[in-house]
Image (tube, rainbow, N blue to C red):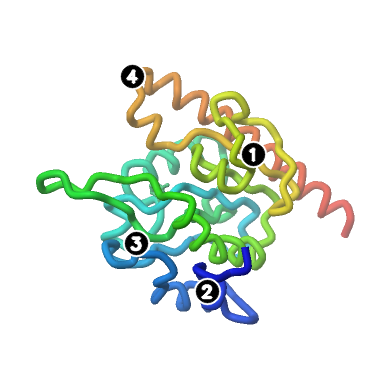
Amino acid sequence: MDGEGTAAALVPARPSLKKLREAATGCKACPLWETGTQTVFGEGGAKADVVFVGEQPGDREDIEGHPFVGPAGKLLDKALEEAQIDRSQVYVTNVVKHFKWKPQGKRRIHQKPNWREIAACRPWLDAEVAVLKPRVLVCLGATAAQALLGRDFRVSRQRGELVDSPLAPNAIATVHPSSILRAEDREAQFREFVRDLEKVAELIAAASNRSSSSV
Ligand code: URA
């Protein structure tokens, strides 16, 4: 893709996270800005070792303007704590930075973003990754995994496996925390999610051992 119809032209020449966040505020690269309350950009430490990528902000995130602050985010926080991944090592973001929804009575119901919307938003994610240079990239759920690791990626089969990716030395996918909230066997699904995050913790530790021994 040559960047036409995407956010590419809005990405600043020498980006920092702050400059990216400011530039993304006014993004109109796809029609979702018309119904979303605001752009919800990624957040976390500028020295984060690991980037978690979800699908798109949810209802709460859209209102508050921060990623993963709603029920799925709370579950992610709990799992990170159990896997002993320090929040300061983590940056969280989404493949699409506006909430896509349709009305149902008084409620706003989540709608899955399409490939055009994902492609339009992609320059923001690529720029976040280029600035952060994470040791580990974690895709949460099928939308992020298929957008970043390949359309044929199947989270049900390939979760927890290391995947080659130009985005980071270690890339891995697991389920989206909101799928755990919907599951009947929530507790078992949560334990499996924590097990995947424990693999992420090992990857972070292995990568930081390698870099400290090469200093
Ligand atoms: N779901 C996501 O994929 N991202 C968020 O920020 C919140 C819920």
At label 1, counting other C-alpha atoms closer than 10 Å, the crowd grade (few under 14, some 14-19, many 20 or more) is many
Could you say which is closer to the camera, residue 173 or residue 187? 173
Q: CA distance from mark 4 to mark 3?
A: 32 Å
Q: Amino acid at mark 1?
A: Ile
Q: Secondary structure at mark 2?
A: helix
Residue 159's quadrant in the figure?
Answer: top right
Q: Residues under labels 1 and 3: Cα distance?
A: 28 Å
Q: Looking at the image, which residue is at 87% across and 60% down?
A: 215
Please state which of the two labelled residues, at mark 4 or mark 3, is closer to the viewer.
3
Q: In the figure, 103 relative to 130: above or below?
A: above
Q: Which comes sooner in the sequence, label 4 or label 1?
A: 1
Return the mark for residue 71: none
Which residue corresponds to mark 1?
A: 172
Residue bearing mark 3: 32
Residue type for callout 3: Leu
Left or right of 20: which side holds 40?
A: left
The disc placed on residue 20 is: 2
Q: Amino acid at mark 2?
A: Leu
Q: Residue furthest bottom?
A: 13
Neighbourhood count class around disc 3 (C-alpha, 10 Å): few under 14, some 14–19, many 20 upward: many
The numbered mark, 1 or 2, whose residue comes first in the sequence reads: 2
The tag earlier along the polypeptide, 4 or 3, is 3
Residue 46 placement (x, y as % from top left): 59, 66
Q: CA distance from mark 4 to mark 1?
A: 25 Å
Q: Nearer the viewer, mark 1 or mark 3?
A: 3
Residue 1, x across and y down, in percent: 62, 63
Q: State the residue position of label 4.
A: 184
Specify the amino acid type for callout 4. Glu
Dots 1, 2 in contact, CB < 8 A: no
Distance, label 1 to label 2, CA atoms, is: 25 Å
Taking the view exactly as shown, the residue that stands out farthest to the left is: 105
